[in-house]
Each structure stands twice: as structure tokens, then as C-alpha cells.
Amino acid sequence: MVHLRNKRDRILSLGQATTQILLGTLLILSSSPSSSQSSGSLVVAADASLFDSLTNFVRINNDNNRHHFRGSDENQEQQEQLANFNILMEEEEQAREHVQEEEGQDDTQMGALASILESVYSFAAKKIGAKPVLVKKQPPNAGNKGDDDGGGAQLRFQYQGTSRHLGQWDLVGVSGVSAMHATLIPNTNKIVFLEKVEKNTHAFLTENAEQFSFSVEYDIDESTFRPLHTKTNQFCSAGGYRPDGTIVSLGGAEAQANIAEGWNSLRFLSSCNATHSRCDWDTRNDITLKAGRWYPTVEALADGRLFIMGGATKGASMNDKEIGVPSWELYPPLESNPTHFAFLEETLPYNLYPMAHLLPDGNLFIFANTRGIIFSTKTWSILKNLPELPGPPRNYPLSGGSVLLPLRPESNYEPEVLICGGATEFSSRGKGQDQCGRIKPLAKDADWVMEDMPMGRMMPDLTLLPDGSVMMFNGANRGTAGYGRAEDPVLRPVRYQPWDSSETIQANSRFTVQNPSYIPRLYHSIAMPVLDGRVMVAGSNPNANTLEWSEFPVEYRVEMFSPGYMFSDTPRPLLAAERTIGRTINRPEALSIQTLQKTNANPERGQGDGPAIENVILFDAVFEIEVQFYSGLVTSEAQVLTPKGDNAGEKPSRVQVNLLNGGFVTHSTHMSQRLVGLEVVGYVVNREGGLDRLKVKGPRDGALTPPGWYQMTVVESGIPSEGTWVRVQ
């Protein structure tokens, strides 16, 4: 059950408040989720219940407001802002009632509402030059069979000279808590958010309406949240997964109110299912970290254990010898845990949330400050010191972002790491870095290749898309990470294409600036790829306390970004089933997955005659996917390749099968994020119009793909199917 309360005395600055009212008002203009929009727009479309939630969310309780003013320095300007806000709320409510008087909304009514909204778009106009305009609904691909006829009118932000191929933003709901930590719940279409212990929340525990919740389970399909119970403070913690899908949240901060300290805490959330639908956090008193950790990092290893390192023993602007935790440990633990890690002393003070990526040889790439190393997971020692990354440090509080680029069979799974952005100096006025460094850490002469970004950005979220490209969301172009230390939000995401089909794409030409959001996402923001191919973007709380009169107050609005592949114009002889997201799209549709178990008689072939296992992929075993393509893949010899091995059939050269783990996300650190391409070894064509079958070889081992749950997608000519949860073991 969702509890949206106004007991928290939240006062918004007028500029930000009007923006949130504008969002709520926009929602009433569509009676159902939109499936067809014109190009170059930010679409806000949802049902009345979501409008009510958003309206309640931004409405100020007058009694609480007056109490707030009495408890602060009362002045004429604040009183005028409160009066203006109340008038604005009344106008918004009158506009809503006026529109709802009749089911049919003509352009005159819509225009009248638009004129009201015209006066409250100033924040968005100032930031990105967008304003609400009245437009008619149009099919996305007029004249194509299967398109919705659209009809009616709606209000939205319109960007001049842009295209949906540069992405589309949708406002989908409210998060309930500030989304400063996030991870998907495996084998569901839900995500869990965690935040710090404070009054910045609108989620209340069901049995105690006066007790705030500091974590929620957010249903992506329904845009609703369910409060969860936490017993320890998970502020600035880290996390990962066990192979069975159990989420592990670890570390945290000091005790507050009736919530215990979280420094050494381990918290577990099992995946919900039909028989266990009310799952909740389980904090074990008998299992703890050996060292208390605030701002640590977690990375999954080849055997499924979690590698945990770094952090501090208390909150601080940056790390130092007095509070640093220069050690690593494992969960489940080794007897020798924790183990001293001198690298984390040598890289002070810029080494909170150190970057880590598991390499396909089973060792770890670790980066802090400006230094990178390869760390053995057998001898637990440094195997290789890499060249220093040019430029300023990239870790908190200067806060760049890193990603392990997709691991691909065609390059023999050679790993490459990309590190982008960050602050240029520890100053609230310093500019964001505008360079990325890219390195092949296992290469004999490994060195950094520098690339120029389209704009400076610190606190970026580098997010893998199922097609193998990288999106860069959130952040600012001035300041550093931390409370109240950043400004000039970067509202335009950037798409980074690591390779093209000919492998000839050049440095500095891999970036494409996308359509902007209008919601600043600064400190404590997240971005997460979800099953349908979109990216959820949420959070932003750059305030130490419940700071009301802030230019960037706590942000609860949840957005979805639809990449350009959601709007492919590629003509295809057959259309996919009609989607409810964005538009009717021509995407391959993976329908079922079966792994052929190995048998004792044929263990080396990776293919057996044992019983099929639904949605399970075994290491080095062949599995089959029934898939419906919509573009007629096999039309000429130029489009097929001879498969490897004994398997019959042909492999389409334009088809990929990818496994994606979005990881545990916080503070621009995407822990255990990973995309692994699998080898397609056979293709059985049904030339009578039925389902085609792909034969695919599972990943070779846990070093390439740590055991656990992944989103599996089939990608055809750069357009991914919707994801399907599979378990790799």
C-alpha cells in the first residue's frame, strides 16, 4: 500500500514548486498511457491516480507551512512566496476541475489550461529552453500497418529541431524515498530504492503511519511503491547479489532515531515470488562485516562471492588516514578477513567508492584517484600497475564514473574499461571534466586513450544499454559531489557507441548528445536499465538535512528514458505485438528459452540430450531461444555466416544475444554492472512464418559471467528485444 503523507513540513522554493505542479497538471491531459507521440518531445502521460499522487506529493499543508515559518526567520519575501504558491495551487485545482467537467476536451479548453501552465514553466525554460505547447496526438510512423490512430490532444514539452531517435523522456511516478541507492529485484519487474535515515521521505510503514520508511520496493509496471523495513542505517552503503538473486546491502552510517548504526551491517532482500510476495529486508545480527565501512565498493567474483573494499569509519568530505579503511574482505567470508590493502593508503584522499570491475581472467581491475591496478583473486596481491590516468582524480568527492565495456565473442572477450568525467578541483566553483579515458588493462602495453566528451560532467551515471552502447546520465558541470557543492545541472544525457559494425569508429566521434530531461539530477541520483529496454532515472538529494528552500530540493519524481532504438523506422515485413510503451515498435521478440543440459556422455561438447531447463543457462552449454524476427533476416548469402561446431543451421550476422546485469547503483558507482555477448552457434529458420530458433552457447565460466540473474536480450541490427530474466549457473 502506498502512503503519501504531508506531515513532513516540506516547503519548496517557488521556482521548483511550480515545476512540480506543472508536471502534475500535465498528467491530467491523457486519460490512458500514451502509445504514440510526435517526435522531439518530452511526454508526460499517465492516469488520474498518478496525477493524484503527484498533486498530493507537491501540495503544501498550510498548517505545517505556518509552523515552519514561525520556527524560522520570518520575512516578507517568504510570506509572499507562500501566498503566491497557494494561489497557484488553487488555479491548478480549478484548471483540473474545468478539464474534467467534460469527457471531450476541445482545443479551446486545452488552450485555456495551457495559458495557466505558461506562467509556471520558467524553471524548465531557463534550463533547456522548453515550454508547454498544445499538439495533436499523431501516430509515430504514420501510414504503417499496426500504428495506433492516436487522436485527441495533449500538452507536453516540445524541443525544437530534435528527434525521438535521440531519446524520449516519460514521467512515470514518484519514488516514495529519495533514490540514492537502487538495484533491480531479480526475476521481477521491480526495483528497490534505499535512502538515508531522515525526514526526506513520503513512504510510511504500514503499521505505523508516523514512522518513515527508508527503503521501498517500486513496481515498474504499476508505478507504485511498497514500504520496506530497515533496522540499520544504509546511508552511503554498497551492495550486490548472491547467485540465487538475494540482494545484499552492506555498510552504512551512524545510528539515527530508532534505526541502528549500519557501519558493519549486512542486509538481505530475497527475490519476491508468487509464494513469498511480501519479502522484506532481513538484517542478521549474527552476520556482520569485519570492518565498518561507509562509501565502500562491492564487486561480484567468479565464484559468486562478493569482494568488498575500502570506505571510511565515518562521514567526511574526503578520506584520510584517520578514518580510512584500507582493507578488503569477502562475503561469504574467508577466515583471514579483513586483509590490509596498501593501495587504498597510497591513493588517499580521493579513494572513496573505488572503482572495480571483474575481468574475464577472474582478476579485478581496481581504480582509485588516478591509479589503476590488476588485483589477483588467487594470490590476493597486485599483479600489474597500470599507467596513471591523465588529469585530476576521478573518485569521490571529484566523482567520475566508470564502466566495463561490453564483453564480446568477436573480440575474444578482451576487456576495456571506460572512465569519464569528474570534477577538476575540490571547489564548488570548479568545472566538470570533459574527458574520458579508455584502456585495455590486459594488453601487454596497456595505456589510456583519451576522448573528449561533448560537455563537462561530474557525478555521471554510466549505464549499459542492451544493444551494447553506454548512456551517460545525471550530474553537474560545476562543483563537486557532496551536500550543496554542485550547480549547473547537466540535463542532456550522452550516448557513447564503443564500436560500429566495421570497428572503425574513431575516438571523439563516439558521443551523441540526446534529448534533455528538465529535472536536475545531482548528488544521490541513479540510472538503471530495465527489462523493456528503457532506463529508469531517479533520485537527487544534495541536502544534508530536510532543506526546503533549496534550488535543488530532494527529488522524488521517477523518469524513464527511451533510447532511439525504441523508435526504429526500419521497415519490416511483420510487426511486433503492440506495445504500451512509447509506440508500436519493430523489435525482435524472444519468446522462450530452454537450456539443453549436459550429460555425462558428452560433457565436452556443451550440448546434451538431457531434459530442458526453462530460463536457466549453464556454463559452456548450448541453449535454444525461440524468437520472432520482423525483418526477414535470411534474404541473401551476404547476411548469413557458417556456424561453428556441429550445430546445423545458419547464424544471422546481424543478431546478438546479450546478458545484462544493471548492478547496484549509488554515487555514480555501478557495482557489478556487466554486459556479456554470447556466441550464436546455430540458427534454424522457419520459412513458413512460425518461430525461428537460435542456438546459443552459454558463457564459458564465472569469470566471464559471475553466477546469478541477468536480463537476456536478442539484438537484431542494433535493436534489442525486451529482456527476459535468466539465471546463469
Image (tube, rainbow, N blue to C red):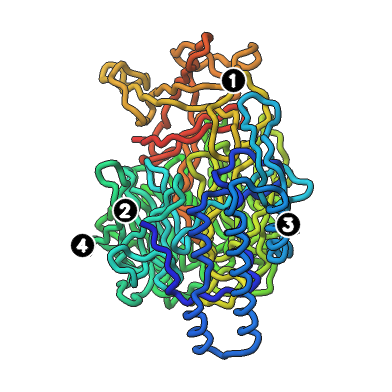
Identify the mark nearer the N-term, 3 or 4.
Answer: 3
Residue identified by numbered label 4: 286
Pointer 1 or 3: first along the chain: 3
Local SS, label 4 = loop
Q: Give the amino acid type for the residue marked by disc 4 in the picture.
A: Asp
Q: Nearer the viewer, mark 3 or mark 4?
A: 3
Q: Are marks 1 and 3 in contact (CB under 8 Å)?
A: no
The x, y position of residue 595, in whole percent, is 36, 25
Q: Earlier in the sequence, mark 1 or mark 2?
A: 2
Pointer 2 or 4: first along the chain = 2
Cα–Cα span, label 2 and label 3? 41 Å
N-terminal of the pair, mark 2 or mark 3, is 3
Q: Tell me the amino acid under the disc marked 2.
A: Leu
* Secondary structure of residue under mark 2: strand
Circles 2 and 3: CB atoms closer than 8 Å: no
Picture coordinates of residue 63, whole percent (x, y): 48, 80
* Label 4: few (<14), some (14–19) or many (≥20) C-alpha neighbours in 10 Å: few
Along the line of sight, the residue nearer the viewer: 535 or 278: 278
Residue 427 position in % (x across, y down): 64, 75
* Residue tagged 3: 130
Q: Residue furthest front?
A: 101
Q: Gap in Å between the C-alphas at discs 1 and 4?
A: 57 Å
Classify residue 16 by image quadrant: bottom right
State whether residue 106 is above or below residue 601. below
Task: Name the residue tied to disc 1.
Answer: 574
Of tags 1 and 4, the one toward the viewer is: 1
Indicate the amino acid at tag 1.
Leu
Spatial distance from mark 1 to mark 2, Cα to Cα?
A: 42 Å
Which residue is labeled 2 in the image? 269
Above or below 157: residue 658: above
Residue at 63% x, 79% y: name it: 81
